[in-house]
Image (spheres, helix red, strand yellow):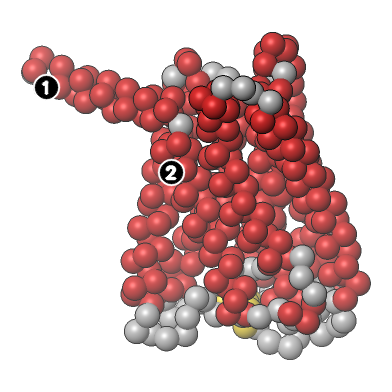
């Protein structure tokens, strides 16, 4: 508690993506464009799923959850990154840093489990199609969604507590573009090995359980698809999983590389590059992947824009 009182008025300084002033305007422009695409794409998915009656299914319910997570996840990181990319003052308050790390971990954990639930949904749809509606009913979907969000937001309090109860006296400079556990641990005056082990065990359990559920679902899905005699049927069944597999591969690849590595293999530049994948790139690509690969989403988006255009034209002529 003494250390907490001493450091709670502390300010951290984020190093950012680059210390080269000539690159900062370019980074700002690229990041701003990517963030705008992320906002537009994910809001569009949420609105379409909410307003289109034929998308009122468990698959799209979880997809709208994923879009909401990506929307919040990106907003937790990117606006501060945009400011610090151009501004000379890159400081972030102790509590601001704690809040950023808390929401980043809570939303990241929630996305991990939601992706596993989406895999389970595809498993039930392909392997048990006749019982799909009775198994994946509205009550179960709501319960799974609320439980996932609640668990991860409560669980992340633990991560934030063990990170920000540490005394920080080595430096104020966080060698990253946002408040992340590994670079923060390296600023502490004390040995953080046991804290890191506790984090890896706790986070590993959540990540491993989600990964195992996803893997088991796809083992069963692939086994069922291979039994389909028609090549058209196999292609159609597999096409419903391609978007999800692409998102899962990108997300888990970045997470495993960032967190589940030996302590001595930490590299600042490499970790910053990988972090861009799941904090900026993945939230932007998720709605794009699902929109391109899914005919129902594409049709609903087109219908939404046509209706809006028609309404605006009718309003124009009425005046």
Q: What residue sits 47% from the left and 60% below the top?
A: 79
Residue 317 seen in the figure: yes
318 with respect to 298 (left or right): left
Q: Element under label 2?
A: helix
Question: Which residue is disc 1 drawn over?
Answer: 316
User: Viewed as shown, does residue 19 lie left or right of 230?
Assistant: left
Q: Position of residue 308 (x, y in %)?
A: 26, 24
Total marks drawn? Answer: 2
Report x, y in % for residue 87.
41, 76
Q: Residue at x 62, y 51 (%)?
A: 249
Q: Earlier in the sequence, mark 1 or mark 2?
A: 2
What x and y, as percent, mark residue 16?
A: 52, 76
Q: Compute the Cα span from label 1 to label 2.
A: 32 Å
Q: Which residue is mark 2?
A: 288
Residue 7 seen: no
Q: What is the quadrant of residue 225 in the picture? A: top right
Which of the 4 quarters of the picture holds residue 234?
top right
Asked whether, in this view, residue 263 is left or right of residue 28, the answer is right
The residue lying at 57 percent from left, 51 percent from top is: 73
The secondary structure type at the circle numbered 1 is: helix
Q: Is residue 51 above or below residue 66?
A: above
The quarter of the image holding the C terminus is top left
Marking on residue 277: none
């Amino acid at each position: 508690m003494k250390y907490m009182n001493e450091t709670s008025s502390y300010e951290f300084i984020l190093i950012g993506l680059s210390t080269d002033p000539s690159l900062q305007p370019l980074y700002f422009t690229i990041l701003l464009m990517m963030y705008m695409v992320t906002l537009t794409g994910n809001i569009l998915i949420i609105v379409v799923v909410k307003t289109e009656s034929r998308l009122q299914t468990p698959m799209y319910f979880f997809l709208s959850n994923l879009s909401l997570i990506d929307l919040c996840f990106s907003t937790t990181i990117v606006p501060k990154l945009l400011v610090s990319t151009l501004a000379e003052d890159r400081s972030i308050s102790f509590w601001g840093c704690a809040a950023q790390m808390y929401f980043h971990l809570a939303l990241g954990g929630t996305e991990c489990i939601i992706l596993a639930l989406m895999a389970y949904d595809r498993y039930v749809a392909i392997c048990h199609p006749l019982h799909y509606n009775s198994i994946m009913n509205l009550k179960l979907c709501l319960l799974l969604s609320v439980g996932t969000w609640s668990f991860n937001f409560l669980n992340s309090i633990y991560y934030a507590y063990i990170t920000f109860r540490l005394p920080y006296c080595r430096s104020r400079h966080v060698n990253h573009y946002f408040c992340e556990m590994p670079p923060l641990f390296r600023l502490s005056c004390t040995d953080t090995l046991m804290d890191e082990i506790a984090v890896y065990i706790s986070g590993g359990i959540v990540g491993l359980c989600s990964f195992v559920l996803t893997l088991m679902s796809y083992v069963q899905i692939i086994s069922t698809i291979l039994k389909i005699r028609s090549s058209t049927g196999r292609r159609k069944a597999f096409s419903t999983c391609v978007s999800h597999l692409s998102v899962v591969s990108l997300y888990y690849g970045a997470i495993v590389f960032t967190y589940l590595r030996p302590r001595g293999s930490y590299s600042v530049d490499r970790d910053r590059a990988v972090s861009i994948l799941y904090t900026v790139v993945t939230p932007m690509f998720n709605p794009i992947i699902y929109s391109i690969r899914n005919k129902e989403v594409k049709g609903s988006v087109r219908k939404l824009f046509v209706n809006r255009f028609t309404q605006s034209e009718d309003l124009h002529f009425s005046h």
